[in-house]
Image (tube, rainbow, N blue to C red):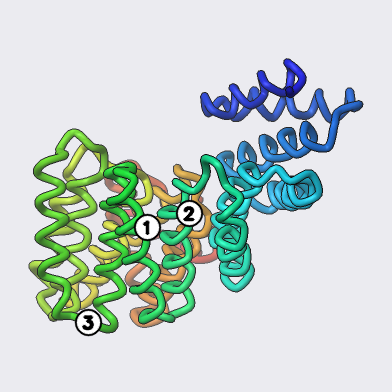
């Protein structure tokens, strides 16, 4: 039986009250005198809360301590949960091999789990995500199909099923174009039947845009991105990627200034979400455009923004816009 204050901390985490959970966990660490199992719960709360607050590197020590305490005390269900959280963190900080090792460890302890076996779909999902980032698309397809099957068996979150299907589309863009139409049809059906589910329609538009771009239908892909951006019910992740996809489409058809504008919009959305890994991708997109087309492109966009009362300088730096011409 856990101490009452540790049980309260667990409830705060379950309710996603991250700031309060961190405050309480810090107080419990200072107080001390808990069992190994209780310290494992406290450190899990710290790890998960910091991860949700985008304090990714700071979350790792508590997560790894929780992992060791769980192994020592035989808290297998808590171990399964912290391995998933750590795996996601390692993906977010681009430590993909460490993520794969951590996530695969989840399956090593599977026979001992009482309740967290239901997390298998999410673990496979993130294994697939890490493999995509490493460019190992054939292996990623197998992992993502495992995730889809696990989600079907557990009737897990329809949003996660939609997300993993979209990621599978991304893989098939690299290794199996013939599989994509049926996956897109599935995404469309899911979006129509679950229109109340946040992000289902924007993600469908994004997946179709990726396929259209791969086929060279850049204008059609751009239209699909715009349709996705007009959807009100989307997550910040999707907004970032729709903006960056639209930027690629516009660059492909020669509308480079607009392409730079949407890359900048993607960066702003990433900053708002505090998704710094996505912000880095947006910065790369902006840099690629400016390196190919020179500073004249940036200055032209800057003038358009100034006429609307918007200032780009905080996002691109004063040195990038060293001279402004006002008319």
Q: Are marks 2 and 3 in contact (CB under 8 Å)?
A: no
Is 29 drawn above or below residue 212 in the view shown? above
The disc, 2 or 3, on the residue closer to the chain's N-terminal end is 3
How far across and down, in percent of the image, does residue 270 sit? 44, 51
- In this picture, residue 66 sits left or right of residue 218: right
Does residue 112 appear in this view?
yes
The residue closer to the viewer here, 254 or 79, is 79
Task: Return the residue at label 1.
Answer: 264
How far is the residue under mark 2 from the one under mark 3? 38 Å
Residue drawn at x 27%, y 84% is 175
How far across and down, in percent of the image, does residue 19 sit? 63, 27
Image quadrant containing the N terminus = top right
Badge 3, how many Cα within 10 Å: few under 14, some, many 20+? some
Which element is circle 1 on?
A: helix
Task: Return the residue at label 3.
Answer: 176
Badge 1, how many Cα within 10 Å: few under 14, some, many 20+? many
Image quadrant containing the C terminus = bottom left
Does residue 58 appear in this view?
no
Task: Return the residue at label 2.
Answer: 315
How far is the residue under mark 3 from the one under mark 1? 32 Å
Q: Which mark is residue 310?
A: none
């Amino acid at each position: 039986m856990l101490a009452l204050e540790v049980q309260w901390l667990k409830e705060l985490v379950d309710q996603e009250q991250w700031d309060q959970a961190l405050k309480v966990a810090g107080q419990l660490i200072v107080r001390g005198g808990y069992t190994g199992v209780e310290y494992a719960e406290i450190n899990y709360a710290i790890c998960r809360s910091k991860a949700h607050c985008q304090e990714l590197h700071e979350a790792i020590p508590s997560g790894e301590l929780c992992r060791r305490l769980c192994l020592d005390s035989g808290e297998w269900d808590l171990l399964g949960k912290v391995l998933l959280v750590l795996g996601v963190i390692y993906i977010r900080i681009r430590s993909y091999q460490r993520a794969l090792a951590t996530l695969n460890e989840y399956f090593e302890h599977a026979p001992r789990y009482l309740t967290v076996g239901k997390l298998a779909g999410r673990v496979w999902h993130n294994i697939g995500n890490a493999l995509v980032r490493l460019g190992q698309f054939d292996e990623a397809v197998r992992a993502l199909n495992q995730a889809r099957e696990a989600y079907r068996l557990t009737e897990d979150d329809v949003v996660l099923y939609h997300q993993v299907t979209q990621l599978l589309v991304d893989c098939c863009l690299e290794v199996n174009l013939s599989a994509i139409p049926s996956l897109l049809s599935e995404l469309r059906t899911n979006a129509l039947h679950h229109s109340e589910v946040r992000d289902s329609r924007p993600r469908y538009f994004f997946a179709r845009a990726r396929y259209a771009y791969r086929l060279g239908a850049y204008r059609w892909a751009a239209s699909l991105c715009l349709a996705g951006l007009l959807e009100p019910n989307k997550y910040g992740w999707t907004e970032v990627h729709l903006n960056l996809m639209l930027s690629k489409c516009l660059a492909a058809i020669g509308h480079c200034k607009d392409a730079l504008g949407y890359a900048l919009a993607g960066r702003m959305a990433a900053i708002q979400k505090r998704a710094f890994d996505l912000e880095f991708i947006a910065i790369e997109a902006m840099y690629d455009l400016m390196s190919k087309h020179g500073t004249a492109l940036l200055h032209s966009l800057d003038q358009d923004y100034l006429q609307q009362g918007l200032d780009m300088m905080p996002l691109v730096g004063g040195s990038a816009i060293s001279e402004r011409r006002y008319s």
